[in-house]
Amino acid sequence: MTESLPHPPAGPLAGIRVVELAGIGPAPFTAMMLADMGADVVRVDRIGDVAPGPSARTPHPDLLNRGRRSIAVDLKSAEGRRVVLDLVADADALLEGFRPGVTERLGLGPADCHAVNPGLVYGRMTGWGQEGPNAPYAGHDIDYLALTGALYGIGPTGEPPVPPLNLLGDFGGGGMMLAFGVVCALFDVRAGGTGQVVDAAVVDGVALLTTQVHALRRLGMWRDERDANLLDGAAPFYRTYECADGRYLAVGALEPRFYAELVRRTGYEPPAGEGRDRTDPAQWPVAREHWARLFRTRTRDEWCELLEHSDACVAPVLDWREAPHHPHLAARRVFVDHAGATQPAPAPRLSRTPGGIRRPPPHPGEHTDELLRELGRDDEAIRRLREAGAVA
């Protein structure tokens, strides 16, 4: 079962103000991570995204936008740009995920923002980076993985490579790297440095994530063929298997003692001719067939009852609905209920200043008046901005 979060503590980033220019994917994920850790994140949404009529009573369903307040601004209007620059003047960081040059054309590029706030950390999230032959063009997670070699290594032999959702690129190589870069730059400012630009590119981050594979290749421990290596599903002791009920089991018994525990608990009998060196790839195809037959003799949950609470390194392959209710995840509150939505909890955990979900996802423009008043605009000034179409 999931658990509702109590009112969260301040968090390690309490006192940090972040302005987020609304986008999709990795930059909002960065903003969510910073908000989870206590930063006051103001999301600048597009006027066209504001729903007509009164705001809905229920939170917006996009969980990536949790933890923020939203102001809706026309970035192409002079009055709208002024509002954003006023927000920037009192901020510690800005996040944007547009193509290179877009914020410069809007008058909200690094030079414009540093003119009003020299200490600002200007975080930029793109797929290809701010320069290079591909920089001006569109791309998606699958493209960045393809270029770095990461996609080449994922999938069965003889079949096309399989994209690992968009988790590896957008969120692992993109959003997390931007969050890391922004926090690094904030530390530099706190130490007396001036503001700077964080150029976070998904393609850079994905390449960094593949460092171990490059190391294994240099060590002679990785073959360039797909589905032929210790960690890509070729090894019989590191792959998924179908069970009697059509559900799946993940087996990760890499080390000899963990493999021995797996063999002991399952009663696995090596096929005739299987040598003692289980790491010999020549023996893997036959061993995989024998393990597959064995795992099809019981249901997934029957195998879990036998193997999960042991050093056999076995876990059930859960679907999206099952995962929040697994006893281990429930015990650690990995998923929580907040504002009526079950969702992943903030991570990682800090012992003294833990993170927390402070607000549900806002509707675009939900806090426009509140934030304008914080900037010193009175009711008449807000009315004029709204009549001019600069805010909504």
Image (cartoon, helix red, strand yellow):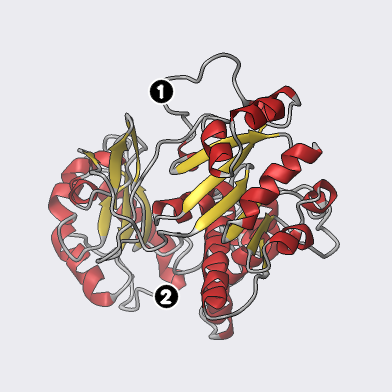
> Looking at the rendering, which quadrant does residue 131 occupy?
bottom right
Q: Residues within 10 Å of mark 2 (few under 14, many from 20)?
A: few
Instruction: Name the residue at the bottom extreme.
Output: 219
Lateral position of residue 182 relative to residue 283, left or right: right
Q: Where's residue 150, x and y in %?
A: 61, 62
Report the side of 298 relative to 136 (left or right): left
Q: Position of residue 311 (x, y in %)?
A: 19, 66
Based on the displayed image, in which of its 4 quarters is residue 213 positioned?
A: bottom right
- In percent of width and height, residue 11 lies at 35, 58
First-in-chain label (2 vs 1) = 1
Judging by the rendered image, the residue that carries numbered circle 2 is 280
Label 1 residue SS: loop
Residue at point 25%, 50% (across, down): 294
Amino acid on which disc 1 is placed: Thr
Quadrant for the N terminus in the image: top left
Residue 162 seen anywhere in this rendered image of the structure: no
Q: Is residue 325 visible?
A: yes
Q: Quadrant of the C terminus?
A: top right
Give the residue drawn at x 25%, y 66%.
352
Q: Which mark is residue 58?
A: 1
